[in-house]
Image: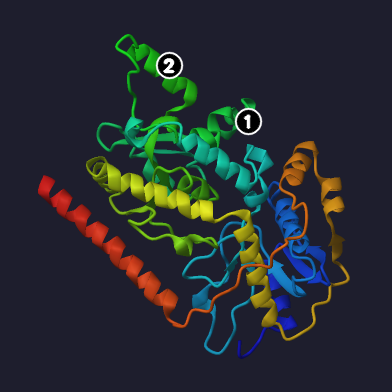
């Protein structure tokens, strides 16, 4: 705020960016440096266009460098005394980086894996979670994903796949096979339904139950959902939190724009990456011993994600861009190599499936109400205190684990 952000700072950030986003008088201009994975670029730009449409004449002129890859690159340790961090937006950050988190593309849909836009997807997930009560779900921890993404955590997690020893169901995701079946076995709305197998009547056989498990997928029967980071941050976090199950988060390193709202034991259970299998088992044992408390944590996680409607996502985008624009000491001008992007041009490049997803996530009209009011925290150390409090809770859970393990041995 003292030194401001100059054009030189923007230009220096170019080597870390996939594109430059410039908004001038409500028009979006993009200078593309390299292609992004799948349809990330298309849906990210679509989201910005919807923001401009939702709040016409209100989004300020701004010049932003943006990267669409997973891992942050602006390291705090490399910023020398007196120098400024390069301003770079991306989908996630860490405590060791200055990258600025921005809502990821999947809030507007992820057609490659049949994930709907956020508001619609959350409604489906919540509806699926209400199909059965908590006590009718299997008391096990479930994870299904791809471990082959240079993720030590996911590789370690694969060693915990023992329902009797660790209380888990760990399944390797085969995206090629899922694609052949239209991702029917990976529907997010089916992943929250049950806790344990139960007989509807004495005549129902175990064979019938097993058939039901195979038809719906085992994920539909588990009450604990594991979140394990992949190559970096994963978009799966918001869907796991939405499930109404008790979310088990394995020592997350990466943060997206809403994860500051996560509080251990309030809306998720912290799992240690040290002695991982035992840590998961302790969480499952705690939840099975305290079912009402475990259910309450899962419900609070779901309520948190329900409060994160697309209206709030757009408000976050608006305030983030507005506060950032205030720091720039120059008038944004699109570079000569930039091209103007509008809804029609994106739809022209989209294939039929992408068009369907884009149109379904479109803002129909400008908002009749202004963005929410950004409240300034009176204590400048608010987030430091907030993080310290959360670390104390995590340490407390680890102490509980250690005492439980010591009692067994």
For this rendering, which residue is in front, 172 or 104?
104
Q: Which mark is residue 112?
A: none
**Which x, y percent locates residue 10?**
71, 77
Q: Residue at x 80, y 37 (%)?
A: 352
Q: From mark 1 to mark 2, how far is it between C-alphas?
A: 23 Å
Q: Residues within 10 Å of mark 1 (few under 14, many from 20)?
A: some
Q: Residue at x 37, y 76 (%)?
A: 385
Q: Residue furthest front?
A: 368
The quadrant holding residue 64 is bottom right
Left or right relative to 265: residue 399: left
Secondary structure at numbered mark 2: helix
Work out whether residue 129 can be spotted: yes
Which sits earlier in the primary sequence, circle 1 or circle 2? 1
Q: Residue at x 37, y 12 (%)?
A: 207
Residue labelled with disc 1 = 179
**Which x, y percent locates residue 46?**
75, 54
Left or right relative to 183: residue 290: left
Work out whether residue 232 can be spotted: no
**Which x, y percent locates residue 84?**
59, 83
Residue labelled with disc 2 = 211
Above or below, 194 relative to 358: above
Above or below, 48 relative to 142: below
Secondary structure at numbered mark 1: helix
For this rendering, which residue is in front, 239 or 276?
239
């Amino acid at each position: 705020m003292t030194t401001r952000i100059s054009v030189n700072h923007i230009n220096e950030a170019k080597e870390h960016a996939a594109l430059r986003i410039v908004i001038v008088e409500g028009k979006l201009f993009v200078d593309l440096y390299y292609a992004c994975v799948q349809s990330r670029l298309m849906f990210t730009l679509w989201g910005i266009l919807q923001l401009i449409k939702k709040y016409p004449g209100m989004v300020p002129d701004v010049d932003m460098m943006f990267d669409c890859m997973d891992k942050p690159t602006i390291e705090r340790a490399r910023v020398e005394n007196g120098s400024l961090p390069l301003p770079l937006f991306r989908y996630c950050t860490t405590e060791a980086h200055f990258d600025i988190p921005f809502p990821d593309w999947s809030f507007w849909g992820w057609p490659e894996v049949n994930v709907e836009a956020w508001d619609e997807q959350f409604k489906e997930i919540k509806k699926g979670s209400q199909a059965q009560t908590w006590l009718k779900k299997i008391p096990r921890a479930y994870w299904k994903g791809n471990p082959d993404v240079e993720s030590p955590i996911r590789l370690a997690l694969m060693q915990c796949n023992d329902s009797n020893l660790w209380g888990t169901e760990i399944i390797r995701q085969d995206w090629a096979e899922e694609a052949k079946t239209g991702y029917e076995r990976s529907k997010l709305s089916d992943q929250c339904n049950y806790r344990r197998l139960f007989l509807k009547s004495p005549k129902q056989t175990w064979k019938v139950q097993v058939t039901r498990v195979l038809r719906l997928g085992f994920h539909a029967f588990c009450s604990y959902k594991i979140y394990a980071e992949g190559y970096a941050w994963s978009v799966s976090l918001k869907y796991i939190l939405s499930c109404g199950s008790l979310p088990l988060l394995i020592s997350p390193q990466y943060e997206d724009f809403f994860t500051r709202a996560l509080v251990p034991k309030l809306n998720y259970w912290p799992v240690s990456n040290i002695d991982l299998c035992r840590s998961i088992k302790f969480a499952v044992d705690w939840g099975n011993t305290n079912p009402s408390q475990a259910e309450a944590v899962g419900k609070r996680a779901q309520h948190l994600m329900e409060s994160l409607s697309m209206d709030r996502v757009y408000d976050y985008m608006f305030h983030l861009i507005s506060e950032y624009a205030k720091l720039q000491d120059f008038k944004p001008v699109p570079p000569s190599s930039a091209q103007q992007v509008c809804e029609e041009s994106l739809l022209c490049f989209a294939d039929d499936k992408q068009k369907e997803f884009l149109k379904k996530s479109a803002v129909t009209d400008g908002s009749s109400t202004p963005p929410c009011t950004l409240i300034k925290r009176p204590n400048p150390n608010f987030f430091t205190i907030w993080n310290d409090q959360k670390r104390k809770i995590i340490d407390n859970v680890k102490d509980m684990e250690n005492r439980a393990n010591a009692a067994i041995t």
